[in-house]
Amino acid sequence: MTSASRPPAARLTASRPLMSVHRRSLLTAALATSALAWGGCSRSSSSDAAAPGGADPVDAADGYPRTIDTADGPLTLTQQASAVACLSSDVADVMLALVGPERMQVVPRTCTQPFHSVHAEAARTVEHVIEVTGVSDPEQILGFAPDLVMLTTRHERESDARAQLGEAGVPMLSITNDWDSPEVFAENVTLLGEVLGAEDAATALVADHRRRWDAVAEPVADRPDSERPVVGMIRTLGDNLWMTGPGTIGDTAVTAAGARTLAGELGLDKGIKLDVEQLVKVDPDGLV
């Protein structure tokens, strides 16, 4: 990228500020927006606390049995799921936002880390924490005796787990999209709310997420590309740095907050593993 293709930006050095105050505010907005994707509403960890938006938790005996259309076919629940294995961080974060940790049997390790999840404190109270490599181990998952498994299939391990656990006959909810827009987020949260018996909490979470998203996105919607800083969204998975790529809510959030994505500027079609030297070499205006 040349200086003619984007606004001047400070390089990644200790002696100079990373970006102007104006650009820093844009990145703050991007970070806030992406965080909303996995937990726009906070919730008390107490099982009898009010759900997001002031809605009361659903009575466990109300509305069961229920049958819900899902990507895996009809899902029939004879009673409220009370030992849920969440194998993907996105479904886990939404469940924590809707009903808290009390009905969760398994949570991914990433959800217990504050730099990955706004619900890390609640996630750390879940009995079983699963590593990334454990997701594709059906025997380990079945050993936790879940009454419902929930996952997102965009990663290979989760896709493998879906196939293997499906053969074992475990009740399962698979999210087969990429959570890559506010509209898709709303669809997924609504479905999770129906499965968990937390419809009112899901409605409140969707409304709060949309309100916050619009508050960030609308003021910068018409900003020309020449005035948008180039921003990379970085995640740490294990000992590795990963740059978020197209088709993710993080990538969409950076754009909505008034920036150009580093992945887009590099012409990437998916996220990639990075090291610090690579980050310095590509010289983005900022990182989230």
Image: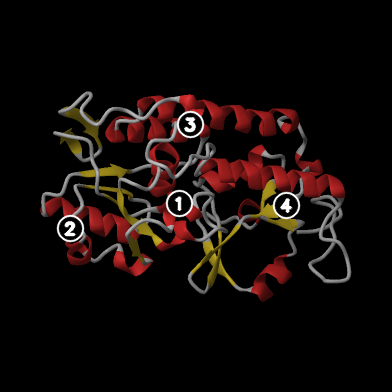
Residue 7 against residue 177 in the figure, above or below: below
Nearer-N-terminus badge (2/3): 3
Q: Which of the two residues, 9 or 27, is positioned nearer the viewer here?
A: 27
Alpha-carbon neighbours of circle 3 within 10 Å: few (<14), some, or many (≥20)?
A: many
Q: How many angstroms separate mark 4 from mark 2 (CA)?
A: 41 Å
Give the labeled residue for mark 3.
52
Among the two numbered marks 4 and 1 on one chain, the one whose residue lies closer to the N terminus: 1
Q: CA distance from mark 2 to mark 3?
A: 34 Å
Q: Is the C-beta separation of discs 4 and 2 under 8 Å?
A: no
Tell me how far mark 4 sits from mark 1, CA to CA.
34 Å
Whether residue 280 sits left or right of residue 142 in the image: it is: right
Residue on which disc 1 sits: 122
| Kind of residue at badge 4 | Val
Provide residue 130's location: percent of width, then percent of height: 34, 64
- Horizontal side of residue 71 vs 31, given as left or right: left
* Label 2 Cα crowd, 10 Å radius (few <14 / some 14-19 / many 20+): some
Q: Position of residue 259 (x, y in %)?
A: 71, 44
Q: CA distance from mark 3 to mark 4?
A: 34 Å
Residue drawn at point x = 54 percent, y = 38 percent? 40
Name which of mark 1 and mark 3 comes first in the sequence. Answer: 3
Label 1 sits on a secondary structure element that is helix
Q: What amino acid type should be assigned to the residue bearing mark 2?
A: Gln
Query: Where does residue 276 sit, x and y in percent of width and height?
Result: 66, 73
- Residue tagged by mark 2? 164
Q: Nearer the viewer, mark 2 or mark 3?
A: 3
* Eye-nearest disc, 2 or 1: 1
Circle 4 sits on which residue?
Answer: 230
Q: Amino acid at mark 1?
A: Ala
